[in-house]
Amino acid sequence: MPISHVFDTYAKTAKGAIMHFDVVLDEQDQEKALSYAKKWLETIGQTDATVTQESCYFCHSVEAPAELRQQIDSQGYAIYKLEGCPK
């Protein structure tokens, strides 16, 4: 299994709520992680949410669990929801 890189990410919604999630990808590339974070926010209807380089940063590397590995293999990244994210 390849090692994946986890980017700890915080986004602020237009209503002021904070969403905390990890962006997991196979490259240690902050620009890609930030881009994927924004892309995911759009898919959940949070197009006005704000996420910046300062709020999307490399945290650690790990072997991704099977569920996240499937997401990475199919779309290039995975999202691990932590706090304030939709179910």
Image (tube, rainbow, N blue to C red):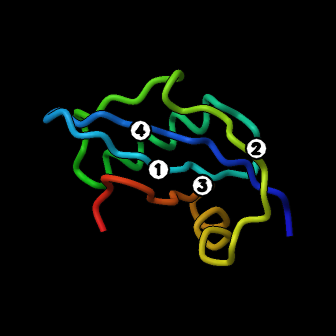
Whole-Å distance between the Cαs marked 2 and 4? 17 Å
Amino acid type at mark 3: Tyr
Label 2: element kind: loop
Q: Residue at x 57, y 42 (%)?
A: 8
Whole-Å distance between the Cαs marked 1 and 2? 18 Å
> Does label 4 or label 1 sit earlier along the sequence?
1
Residue under numbered circle 2: 27
Q: Which of label 1 and label 2 is nearer to you?
A: 1
Residue under numbered circle 4: 38
On the rendered structure, is 19 left or right of 54? left
Determine whether 32 is above or below 41 in the image.
Answer: above
**From the image, which quarter does the N terminus lie in?**
bottom right
> Does label 1 or label 2 sit earlier along the sequence?
1
Label 3: element kind: loop
Q: Residue at x 58, y 67 (%)?
A: 71
Whole-Å distance between the Cαs marked 1 and 3? 13 Å
Callout 4–callout 1 Cβ contact below 8 Å: no
The residue most toward the bottom is 66
Q: Residues within 10 Å of mark 4 (few under 14, many from 20)?
A: some
Amino acid type at mark 4: Lys
